[in-house]
Amino acid sequence: MENFILFLKNLLIYLGLYKLNYNFSSNIDFGSKKTNIFFKKIIKKSNLVFEYGSGNSTYFMEKNKINYISIESKKDIFIKLKKSKLNIFFFHLV
């Protein structure tokens, strides 16, 4: 039952019928200090990063002048981040 409720919530978010308040920054938090350090180290060495799912990592790359392409599938996130003039694209499956 819990999975079904989560599915319905994500479906409503996807359809734009349920809005979340997203607060983005360039702070990276993947759950552990070791993972955060690994991510930052790998990203800073990269010539170009392709990212599916935009957010704090997108801001991090922009702030650190890292070349990236970010694909976002949630329209509300895309609109919010696009206003910040980030290099993101909207991808929507019909």
Image (cartoon, rainbow, N blue to C red):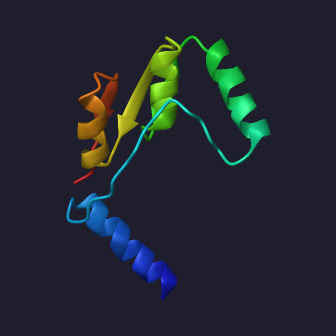
Count of marks, rendered view: 0
Residue at 49%, 79% in the rendered image: 3
Q: Position of residue 17 (x, y in %)?
A: 20, 65
Viewer-nearest residue: 25 or 38: 25
Above or below residue 41? Residue 47 is: above
Query: Seen from this angle, which residue lies furthest right?
Result: 34
Query: Seen from this angle, which residue lies furthest bottom?
Result: 1
Q: Position of residue 31 (x, y in %)?
A: 68, 48
Residue at 33%, 53% in the rendered image: 21
Q: Position of residue 93 (x, y in %)?
A: 27, 51
Above or below residue 71? Residue 92 is: below
Above or below residue 60? Residue 22 is: below
Q: Quarter of the image holding residue 52? A: top left
Viewer-nearest residue: 19 or 6: 19
Left or right, residue 56 beside residue 7: right
Tell me the quarter of the image containing the C terminus: bottom left
Residue at 25%, 47% in the rendered image: 76
Viewer-nearest residue: 31 or 87: 31
Q: Position of residue 7 (x, y in %)?
A: 40, 73
